[in-house]
Amino acid sequence: MITLYGQDDSGNCYKPRLLLAKLGIPFRHVETRTGPGGATRTDGFIAKNPNGRVPLLELEDGRRIAESNALLLYFAEGTRFLPQDRYERALAYQWMFFEQYSHEPYVAVLRALMVYPERAKDATPEKLAATLAGGEKALGVMEEQLKRTPFFAGSAMSVADIALYAYTHEAPRGGFDLAPYPAIVAWLRRVEADPGHVPLTWLPA
Amino acid sequence: MITLYGQDDSGNCYKPRLLLAKLGIPFRHVETRTGPGGATRTDGFIAKNPNGRVPLLELEDGRRIAESNALLLYFAEGTRFLPQDRYERALAYQWMFFEQYSHEPYVAVLRALMVYPERAKDATPEKLAATLAGGEKALGVMEEQLKRTPFFAGSAMSVADIALYAYTHEAPRGGFDLAPYPAIVAWLRRVEADPGHVPLTWLPA
């Protein structure tokens, strides 16, 4: 069986868990905490992933793959979650890189400062304001797209939606108000209505 | 003919230019400056890309694709630059997301502060030190991989190498010393020896 190293309340780790649940692929979860004193900082884990991050996938033969969105693409190939149309597939790629560069460093980081207050002690008011502004910008870009198409790559749900759902549905916990983004709120409900949905805290039995 | 909106000295914009040159695909370059007062901040450009970033690809029918690494994947499909092996393809994805999350925000950002000094006025010593440290960590992770395989996804060059070459070969301009990373230096020379290489400043005639 494949093994997924991850933290139970991390949005990045939730992404592959959600896709694996939808695809019905069994896996073993190994709780691996991030942050100061976490397991990701140990020599044993660094030997598995030199970048010291989760999620990390370990195949049955011991080979490993890192990066949440790379895992989404790896498992999505050949399924309905990777668009068959070349242009729509490019849009899925586009929104996944948008998620990691323009969304996660703001929306996920602000949530982390609220959920793990011990990480907030070095956060200056200027840093908090810049993080909030970056997140609002990302949400605005998403809202524009979702006014035009029901999902990010077009008419059907894809890995881009899973990537962006992970932290967007948690944005209120980071202090973001989603009321000004009705297209995003409607999209969150569409993602949750897609067959096989499981919540962020779901773990395999 | 396709159109690529980009800035002539941007590493992110260089990525698709380098791949298009290697593949012999003709394109029109539209110089589009970033930063304060740049073209990417204008309403006309925001209408094309709500995230206000380059590179941006415009197809002949007017459809658009953003994000440098999404463009690499879009053009690489069916070519030697996207590994045929499923695991190696996943590694290519992994290193491209690593590049945008763990490398570019440090290596490219420090270079930008040196190349465009007007952007450095708000950079505190703490910010500069943290950016340098993040870049050194990314280079260390790359060095570990390149001690084991000649290219990031394995034995052959892929889009992951193009993504990481773009700003790594410019890292010395940002103040990074590559001497402690001999595997990276040897890899830079391998990438440059791959057929059809063009420098960062290359633009189509």
Image (spheres, coloured by chain):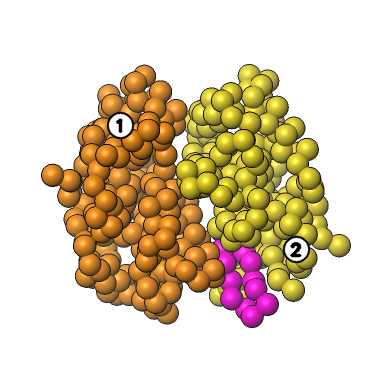
Chain colours: A yellow, B orange
Subunit that carries the residue with mark 1: B
Q: Is residue B186 left or right of residue A117?
A: left
Residue at left offset 62%, top offset 45%: A158
Check disc 2 and report the residue beneath it. A25
* Whole-percent x, y for residue A163 in the image: 61, 46
Range covered by the magenta-colored residues: A55-68
Q: On the rendered image, what quadrant is the C terminus of chain B found in? A: top left
Secondary structure of the residue carrying tag 2 is loop
Q: Nearer the viewer, residue A196 or B61?
A: B61
Residue at left offset 23%, top offset 34%: B30
| Residue type (three-letter) at the residue carrying disc 1 | Gly
Q: On screen, B33 above or below B140? A: above
Q: CA distance from mark 2 to mark 1?
A: 45 Å
Subunit that carries the residue with mark 2: A
- Tell me which corner region of the image, top left, top right, bottom left or bottom right, holds residue A186: top right
| Residue type (three-letter) at the residue carrying disc 2 | Ile
Q: On screen, A157 above or below A75? A: above
* Whole-percent x, y for residue B168 in the image: 31, 59
Magenta segment includes B172? no
Q: Nearer the viewer, residue A5 or A128?
A: A5
Check disc 1 and report the residue beneath it. B35
Q: Is residue A77 left or right of residue B115?
A: right
Q: How many marks?
A: 2
Secondary structure of the residue carrying tag 1 is loop
Q: Is residue B122 left or right of residue A145?
A: left
Magenta segment includes A67? yes
